[in-house]
Image (cartoon, grey):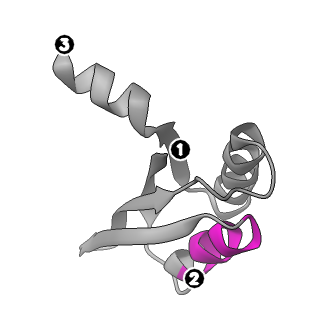
Amino acid sequence: MRAVITVIGKDMVGILAKVSNICAEQNANVIEVTQSVLQDMFAMIMLVDITGLTGSFTHLVDSMNELGGSLNLSIHVMHEDIFNTMHRI
């Protein structure tokens, strides 16, 4: 099972590290990352393997939402099944 994590917001030092740290803490393996900085805006898409999560998927989502709130970033976590279904329609 995999999930797609998107991050959008004002660029600052350590965004990738902080998101990756939450993934590591919850045993979500980062498979692929793409990121861009457009002027002062940061945009990232991350694909993670969630097969070995130590907690629930909801806990991962809540952790990312908490991080996003603390850094004023939009962080969205979507299960791959939902992502694929949305793009088939």
User: Residue 75, relative to residue 34: is it above or below?
Assistant: above
| Rendered residue at 46%/49% (across/down) | 2
Foreground pick, 64 / 80:
80
Q: Which residue is mark 3?
A: 89
Neighbour tally class for label 1: few under 14, some 14-19, many 20 plus, Cα within 10 Å? many
Q: Which residue is mark 1?
A: 77
Amino acid of disc 2: Ala
In the picture, the quarter occupied by the C terminus is top left
Q: Which residue is mark 2?
A: 17
Q: Is residue 21 magenta?
A: yes
User: Where does the image place residue 78, in percent across and percent down from the top left?
Assistant: 48, 38
* Rendered image quadrant of residue 86: top left
| Rendered residue at 57%/54% (across/down) | 50
- Looking at the rendering, the stretch of residues picked out in magenta corresponds to 17-26
Secondary structure of the residue carrying tag 2 is helix
Secondary structure of the residue carrying tag 3 is loop
Outermost residue, bottom side: 13
Measured in 3D between alpha carbons, the distance from the residue under mark 2 to the one under mark 1, in whole angstroms, is: 16 Å
User: Residue 87, relative to residue 3: is it above or below?
Assistant: above
User: Where does the image place residue 41, in percent across and percent down from the top left?
Assistant: 34, 66
| Rendered residue at 64%/55% (across/down) | 68
User: Where does the image place residue 32, in percent across and percent down from the top left?
Assistant: 34, 70
| Rendered residue at 52%/49% (across/down) | 74
